[in-house]
Amino acid sequence: MPKGRSFAAKLAHETSTEGKIICPKCNSEVKKIKLVRNKKSKAETWAPKYEFVNICKCNEKDIMSGKI
Ligand SMILES: [Zn+2]
């Protein structure tokens, strides 16, 4: 599939730019993702909370499963 291959090549090129963070523990790329969490306050109202989290292989399972 030439189209898919060219896309992968493009992606590989773009991710090899400067500023890429590699986790020293798992040796994989650390990505910054935006999480939206609904936290229920004492007033019984839902307040969406936005936060950026650095995610790599060390914590991706916990984050994706909602543990963190
Ligand atoms: Zn890691």
Image (spheres, rainbow, N blue to C red):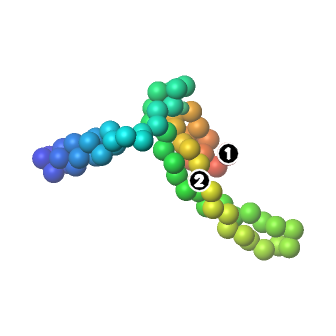
Q: Secondary structure at mark 2?
A: strand
Residue receiving disc 1: 67
Find ligand 1 in the image and state its quadrant. Answer: top right
Residue most extreme to the right: 42
Q: Is residue 2 visible?
A: yes
Is residue 36 depicted above or below 43 in this figure?
above
Residue 67, image x, y percentages: 67, 45
- On residue 52, which mark appears? 2
Q: Residue at x 82, y 67 (%)?
A: 41
Q: Nearer the viewer, residue 59 or 22?
A: 22
Q: Residue at x 18, y 44 (%)?
A: 5
In this picture, residue 45 sits left or right of residue 13: right
Number of other residues with Cα within 10 Å of mark 2, as a class: few under 14, some 14 to 19, many 20 or more: few
Residue 9, image x, y percentages: 22, 42
The three-letter code of the residue at mark 2 reads Phe
Q: Secondary structure at mark 1?
A: loop
